[in-house]
């Protein structure tokens, strides 16, 4: 809920306090860079300090970032705050939290159910994202019915964001010890048999995420804002339905993966979603653009539970945190770099340029992924 709320209101809040396009993208990029830094720490230290402890630290740092944004509008310090507070403009958690949780899930289920559990995990996450997107409508309500000033209405939303983050940390503290690494000692490097697979998968994931960095929720919100003049009163409900569509795609992915395999599901659903997105900037009005965007969202997330399930299936149990962390670290870093590059492109080339570059890179990723991994099966597909 918190991540989705922040991704919708972040660009609108920055516009309200005087940021231009370049500085908005820089702030988004700093937040994603902070997520990458958190992922790096989790990759090599979560199993040492404890997975629960690491998730609690995440919630508290996010809360501190939100509290600053709720109280101050200092132009220069905001970049540092979005970095340290890991203020995520992506619209969904793809950083420290995902890395740790991705290592926990496989050890509390069996191989044949792993993808299904990842699918339901992502459904729950997206339900929270959907509610968070609706909460982004709150500043409009505060202004319209209570007469709250523009900046203050956004600051109230940041205060609630901080409450959500603290609540998350409290819930995590109640996880059982089954969430921690069991029986084996934490490792600091991958085995020779896993290193090549993880390195290649992470490198390909970086291409996908570099494309995704042009397509963060914050940047897409900003594109709809500039192209059609809509604000959070439209964008909040829009991204509510986006997350509902994503939830449907997660469950469909688990069903489809049982029949055609994890890699085939990743590729054959991701390709058409990118093609759909490329058509959105050509649409003449808001209803058609919105329809095609939502149609794309029915497909685009089908590779998420399958990808999460796949990378932890092809390595050893004690390697899961590092394998997931390396993959997510390359993804987070690529998102941050792409978000930084998106700003000058939107400001100096074309406001819709990210909607062409992002899907184009994702198409390249899909083709390379299929070529590289179509013959490497997870255990349940080998055993049938």
Image: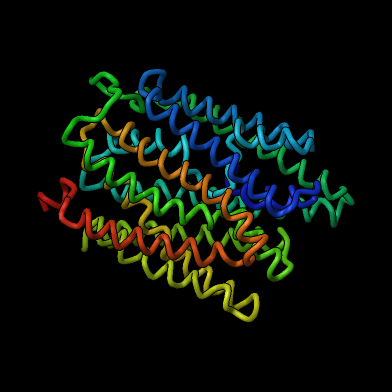
User: Residue 104: which quarter of the image?
Assistant: top left
Task: Confirm whether residue 162 shows in the render.
Answer: no
- Residue 279 position in % (x across, y down): 51, 75
Task: Confirm whether residue 23 shows in the render.
Answer: yes
Q: In the rendered view, how is the structure colored?
A: rainbow
Please indicate whether residue 14 sits to the left or right of residue 338 in the image: right
The residue closer to the viewer here, 135 or 58, is 58
- Residue 89 position in % (x across, y down): 59, 47
Task: Work out whether 95 lies above or below 232.
Answer: above
The residue closer to the viewer here, 366 or 343, is 343
Residue furthest to the bottom: 284
- Residue 6 position in % (x across, y down): 64, 45
Say how many tags the image has.
0
The residue closer to the viewer here, 76 or 144, is 76
Please indicate whether residue 249 sits to the left or right of residue 317 in the image: right
Residue drawn at (59%, 59%) of the image: 239
Residue drawn at (43%, 71%) of the image: 275
The residue closer to the viewer here, 258 or 375, is 375
Please indicate whether residue 161 sits to the left or right of residue 379 in the image: right
Residue drawn at (34%, 38%) of the image: 324
Please indicate whether residue 215 sits to the left or right of residue 195 in the image: right
Residue furthest to the right: 147
Residue furthest to the front: 348
Residue furthest to the left: 383
Residue drawn at (42%, 60%) of the image: 361
- Residue 285 position in % (x across, y down): 65, 79
Quadrant assignment for the N terminus: top right
């Amino acid at each position: 809920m918190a991540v989705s709320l922040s991704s919708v209101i972040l660009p609108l809040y920055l516009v309200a306090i005087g940021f231009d396009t370049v500085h908005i993208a820089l702030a988004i990029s700093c937040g994603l860079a902070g997520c990458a830094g958190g992922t790096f720490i989790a990759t090599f230290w979560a199993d040492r300090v404890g997975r629960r402890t690491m998730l609690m630290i995440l919630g508290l740092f996010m809360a501190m970032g939100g509290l600053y944004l709720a109280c101050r509008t200092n132009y220069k310090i905001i970049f540092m705050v979005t970095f340290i507070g890991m203020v995520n403009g992506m619209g969904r958690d793809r950083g420290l939290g995902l890395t740790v949780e991705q290592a926990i899930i496989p050890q509390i289920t069996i191989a044949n159910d792993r993808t299904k559990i990842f699918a339901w995990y992502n459904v729950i996450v997206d339900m929270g994202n959907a509610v968070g997107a609706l909460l982004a409508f709150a500043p409009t309500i505060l202004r319209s019915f209570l007469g709250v000033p523009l900046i203050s209405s956004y600051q109230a939303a940041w205060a609630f964001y901080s409450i959500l983050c603290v609540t998350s940390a409290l819930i995590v503290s109640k996880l059982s010890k089954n969430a921690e690494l069991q029986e084996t000692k934490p490792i600091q490097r991958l085995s020779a048999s896993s290193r090549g697979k993880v390195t290649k998968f992470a490198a390909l994931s970086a291409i996908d995420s570099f494309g995704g960095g042009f397509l963060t929720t914050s940047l897409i919100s900003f594109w709809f804002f500039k192209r059609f003049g809509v604000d959070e009163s439209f964008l909040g409900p829009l991204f509510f339905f986006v997350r509902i569509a994503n939830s449907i795609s997660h469950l469909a992915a688990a069903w489809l993966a049982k029949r055609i395999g994890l890699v085939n599901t990743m590729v054959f659903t991701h390709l058409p979603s990118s093609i759909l997105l490329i058509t959105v900037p050509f649409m003449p009005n808001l209803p058609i653009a919105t329809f095609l965007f939502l149609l794309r969202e029915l497909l685009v997330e089908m590779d998420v539970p399958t990808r999460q399930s796949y990378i932890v299936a092809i390595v050893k149990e004690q390697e899961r945190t590092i394998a997931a962390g390396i993959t997510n670290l390359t993804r987070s870093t690529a998102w941050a770099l792409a978000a930084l590059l998106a700003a000058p492109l939107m400001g100096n080339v074309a406001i819709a340029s990210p909607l062409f570059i992002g899907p184009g890179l994702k198409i390249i990723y899909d083709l390379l992924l299929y070529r590289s991994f179509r013959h490497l099966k997870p255990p349940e597909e080998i055993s049938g």
